[in-house]
Structures are given as structure tokens and as C-alpha cells.
Image (cartoon, grey):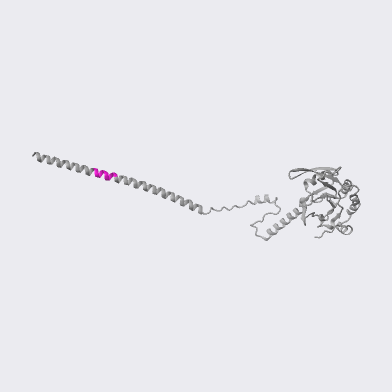
Amino acid sequence: MRNDANRQNRGSAETDAAQSQCDDSERRVKQEQRAQGQQSLAESTIEDESANEDEQLSHQRLEQQQPLPTVKVTPDPAEDNAREGDRLIPAAEEDATSADEDAKRRTTCAQRLRRHRETSRLNRPSAWGRKCLVLDLDETLVHSSFREVDNPDYVVPVVLEGQEHNVYVVKRPGVDEFMRIMGQYYEIVVFTASLSMYADPVLDLLDKSQVVHHRLFRESCNLYNGNYVKDLQAIIIDNSPASYAFHPNNAIGISTWFNDPHDTELLDLIPFLIDLTNVEDVSAVLGINHDHAALSL
């Protein structure tokens, strides 16, 4: 009996141990399954985030490849009309369709261009009824030098390349009387190939009678064959034939003056110039009765 009881107890203990081992195995399997599920969930989340990033990058690339929409701006006609007054030639109107509008626009352009040409060189005569007498400055009315001379009439400071230099100016004999008398008969214009930074202050000192109506400098000359040519339609007195190459029949040649104190050419010209005020076509007289230095063109 005791042996049977012992065998039953051992069997029951073995059964409990086996059951415990089964329970442990089931727990380990469940833990492994939970661990695998968590890992799968993490990997799935990572894959989803990576897919979202790839999708965003694809959208960005697509947006960069697509051209931006074009916005057409229609100009304001009122604004164009306000600016048109400042233009020499108005801008072409792309929407003009009729021949009448095209012809009107061409006429307007031609009128503005003509006004520009009339005012860009010499202004309209301010002394109506008088002829225009154009005078050269250097070696015609005065002589100037950077080297110091005895008894200069004026000393004019000019700045060249950042340095100040003195220009010594001597007046041609009779120039004051010549200018005063010619101012009574002509509209006087001084047209020089010198730079305005020098010529302008010289004329401020020379024109005591204030008879010079207009001043033109090198900026208004045309460079032709290495010479500065004065483009004009008037009477010009100049010592350089190159200056009046385009208008030889409107010119009176005068000798180059440096320092001769006995020179009288300006005074000698006064009576002749007074007579020219009564001539209708000065070029007909100057072309026949005066010797000009011929310039080969």
C-alpha cells in the first residue's frame, strides 16, 4: 500500500512538472510572437515613413519640372500716354490695325524728329531779322597757351586728369570793338572745337558786351578725317579751313593769330560784314569774292 502511494505521488509530481514545462513553453512562444509582432509593426512604420518621403520628393521633382504659369500684363494706355510726351519717337502700338492709325503715327514721329533736329544744334535765332555770324575762338579771337606768357589778358584755371593747370589767354587786337559792333548787326554764335571746361570761362571774360547769343563747343562738332568739323548753315569766321569743310561758301577765312600786336584783320572785316547784312544769299557772295583754303574731301 505504501509503495503504491509513493508511486502515485511520483506520477503526480512528474505530471505537474510536465505541465509546468508545457506552460513555460507556451509563455516563451507567446513572448516570441509578441516580439515578432512588435518588430513587424516597427518595420511597417519605417517602410510607411520612407514611402511618404519618397512620395514627397517625387512631388517636388514634378513641381520643379513643370513650368510656372505665364501671367500676361496688359499695359495701361493712360500710363503710356503720360510717358509718350518724354519720348523722341513714341513706341509702336502693337494693336494698331488700320492704315489711318499707322499714317498718323508716322506723321507724329516725323514731326518730333524734325523738332529734335531743329533744337539739338542751334536754337532758333533769338534776334529775328538778323543773320547768324559764327565765330571761332582760338587763334581767331584769342590765343591761349599752357606756357606762361608776358602780360596775359586772362589766366584761366582748368582741371585736367585731376590736376589744375593755368591757361594764359591773350586777346587779338581789336576783338573788343569787333564784338561790340558785330553784336549790333548779327546774332553772334561762338563755335569752337575746344572743350567747354576751358572755352566757357574764357567767353565769360571775353564777352563784356554780352553779345554772344549761343556757345557751341567740341561736343557739338563732328569728327571728320581727324578734324573737328562744325556743322552749320550760317556765316562762319575761322582760321581753320577744316572747320568749315561742309560749308565753304558760308565761311570767311582769317589768318591764324598768335601774338602779332599790329594785326588788324578783325577790324578790317567790320565794313564787309555790315554790308553782308543786306545780302539775301551770303553764300553767293562768299563763294565768289573770298578766298578760302580748299579742303580735299
- Is 219 on the left-hand or right-hand side of 258? left
> Residue at coordinates 68% horizontally, 50% vertically from top-left?
83
Q: Mainly helix, strand or loop, the magenta region?
A: helix
Quadrant of the rendered image containing residue 93: bottom right
Q: Is residue 70 magenta?
A: no
Horizontal and vertical percent position of residue 210: 84, 45
Quadrant of the rendered image containing residue 98: bottom right
- Is 281 on the left-hand or right-hand side of 21? right
Above/below status of 130 relative to 16: below
> Residue at coordinates 13% horizontally, 41% vertically from top-left?
8
Which quarter of the rendering shows the C terminus? bottom right
Residue 119 visible somewhere in the drawing: no
**Closer-to-camera residue (191/86):** 191
Residue 83 visible somewhere in the drawing: yes
Could you tell me how many numbered marks the image carries?
A: 0
Which quarter of the rendering shows the N terminus? top left
Horizontal and vertical percent position of residue 77: 64, 52
**Closer-to-camera residue (180/87):** 180
> Residue at coordinates 71% horizontally, 56% vertically from top-left?
109
Horizontal and vertical percent position of residue 110: 73, 57
Horizontal and vertical percent position of residue 211: 85, 46
In the current view of this chain or complex, which residue is farthest to the top?
Answer: 2
Q: Which residues are magenta?
A: 24-31
> Residue at coordinates 22% horizontally, 43% vertically from top-left?
21
**Closer-to-camera residue (17/134):** 17
